[in-house]
Image (cartoon, rainbow, N blue to C red):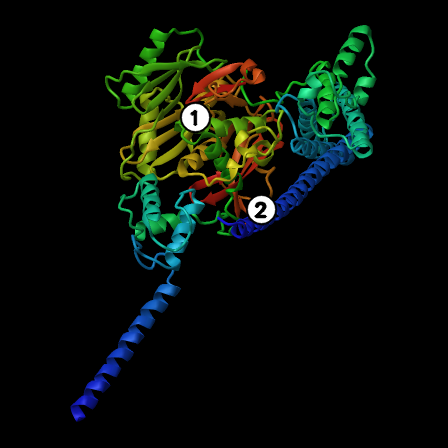
Amino acid sequence: MNDEKRKKLYSWLSITFALAFVASLAWGVYEYQLLKEYRVATENQYKRAFNDLVTSLNEVETSMSKAKVANSPALKALYMGETWKGCDSAVGNLGQLPADEVGLSYVDTTINQVGDFSKTMTRKVASAEVMTAKEMAIFEDMHNRIIDVNRAAQQLSQQVYSENLAWIDKPEGLLEKMGFGGKNQTVQTAAQGEESGAEDKAKQEDQQKPSSSVRSGLNQLSETLQKHPPFDYEGEMDKHYVEKPLGLPKGEIDEKKAISVAKDFLEKIGYKEATPELSGLSQGPMGGFIFKYNDIILEVTKQGGVVSIYRDKREINERKLGLEETVGKAKDILKKLGWSSMVITTTQDLGETFQIDAVHFESGFKIYPDKLRLIIATDNGQLVGLDSTPYYAFHHDRNLNTVLSLEEAKAKLDKNLQVKESSLAVIAKIGTQEANCYEFIGIGYGEEYLVYINAIDGSEEKISRVIQTPRGKLLQ
Amino acid sequence: MFEQKKKNQIRIMTIISVSMVICLILSAVVGAALGDRALTSGSKGSEVKELQQKLTQLGYQLGTVDGVYGKKTEDAVKRFQKNRGLKVDGVAGEKTIKELKRLTGESQTAEGKKVGYKGNDLKLLARCVYSEGRGEPFEGQVAIAAVVMNRIKSSSFPNTVAGVIYQPQAFSAVDDGQINLEPDETATKAAREALDGTDPTHGAIYYFNPDKTKNKFIWSRPQIMKLGKHIFTR
């Protein structure tokens, strides 16, 4: 290669590199701009949620104050309703803020509980009932805690605007771990400022670890709220699981007994000589033994030794059965399994299966909380799914009485409702409470409704709207 | 000469007739509605597109909605037929299309007023189940959906399906964008059961994969059971 050629090559190379460099630079700038836009959009979302949170909390606190002094059902119900609505909004906004762990914050819990309680009270005072002294005391207690939460939120809000506070604490970098780097801004919550006593003070200092984020401020507030005793409220507000199942038979069983329960169950639904194998144990009040057999999974409770969950994922062939035949099969299965007291309430056509719900029936009452769910295959009518956990969670001896007659209860209905069917029913209320009711199924305003009138005091307990969906009737 | 002229006339007439027939067929195909004819592998057009849209609406994955009845559409039709207890032949005939139309219809009041599809939460919940638990046994997928429903009931979490699913750091599949994957029919079915109240976890509000998680907090929660790869905790 002579000099001329080499020169040419070098100049071409330089031009190519220069172009590549310029292109990568332009690409970098473009990406940076894009990232910046996204960051601003995310930051705006957080700021909006936080701002809405602070506003909602302020409204909740104010409504609570007014609800206490309101003396007419109209205004008391209005302010209780505003409290409930504000709590819902606050929890929604809180859930949009960045977090390090979820489900741990007492801030969420406190606001949700105030929301639940004010929802119950809204209903109570709207029906011109007077809040008891105990309920007023709980509400007062709740208001005091909301004042703390609100003050803390206001203070954080000030810092967000004046100090551009971060949303979450950044994990310690290498420099910080080596002892370099300054300490971050502390977010001290207003609620903490109120604490007193040596022990509290020590904890307070501990909680005031250097931090510089909204989340750490909320975490500190959560720790403060955690120190308060739980609200003394009878209704079970957190109802995601049943602590004491009421319907499980007494006594505990061992693995050997559980195997025989599983075998017996499988035989009754058409699997003779089945050999279920233990695949695991489940813990908790409804816990027990989990078995597997071919495509089947089933669970037998430790307490009482009953089948709580059963599922067969076998291949289901072409459909042979319609609704009526499947319901007939479901009734036979219920009888075979010893559920003689159940009545079928709803059915859903799922194609290769029907989902059928049945409830306990006693002294003319449909007991809705004591529910069983059956899934029946439409190829041969075999049981391919069972969930009896609601039944065992809630079944107990009840006082199934009425004070009102059917006609008296009917007189409480909207005059435009044409009643098609009526019966007695026990329905679940907020928490673990129940109500003895008359159930009226009727048509009004072009729609079908289920209206429940309390059979003891005549109050309208619940309304379900019936919608015809492609899969069957849906209660809303 | 005369014969030649007659031949030409016949040729022209034939061409005109054939073109008219083709035009008629084409217009029939273009304006055809789903259900006018059986659709099968190789079918094309707006009816196929409508069929694909309806299958997708019910959670049957078939790739792109392109109006071409290919292998993926045929498979989706077969899965739909299987799930609905119909004869599994991959041909969208009268029964299959009737069932598909029925299931994708709007909900109605007693007097027949349409009130919408009522499936918003189901769609999102199915996406959550699919992105978090595809490959898990069916019961494990119902359990994931049940955790979302239990969080709604719990006072420590937001109160809506979207609120729980999109809570930052709540589900890894949301944070890494997998939540936007189209769910399959198993995930949709699992989500529907949980929305209807089934809870195989007896009240779990967390779950984790023990092989992949070292997080101390999640290991410290009271464990309820193991379903598939996940441990469900309170």
Position of residue A313 relative to residue A30, above or below, is above
Corner quadrant of residue A273? top left
**Residue with the most extreme bottom position:** B1
Q: Position of residue A42 (x, y in %)?
A: 67, 39
Can you say which quadrant of the picture contains the C terminus of chain B? top right
Image side of residue A292 versus residue A390, left or right = left
**Circle 2 residue:** A17
Q: CA distance from mark 2 to mark 1?
A: 55 Å
Amino acid at pointer 2? Phe
Residue B187 at x, y = what percent? 43, 35
Residue name at image x 49 percent, y 16 percent: B224
Q: Say whether residue A24 is left or right of residue A168.
A: left
Chain of the residue displaying label 1: B
Mark 2 nearby-residue class (10 Å; few <14, some 14–19, many ≥20)? few
Task: State the residue position of label 1.
Answer: B140
Label 1 near label 2: C-beta < 8 Å? no
Q: Can see residue A455?
A: no
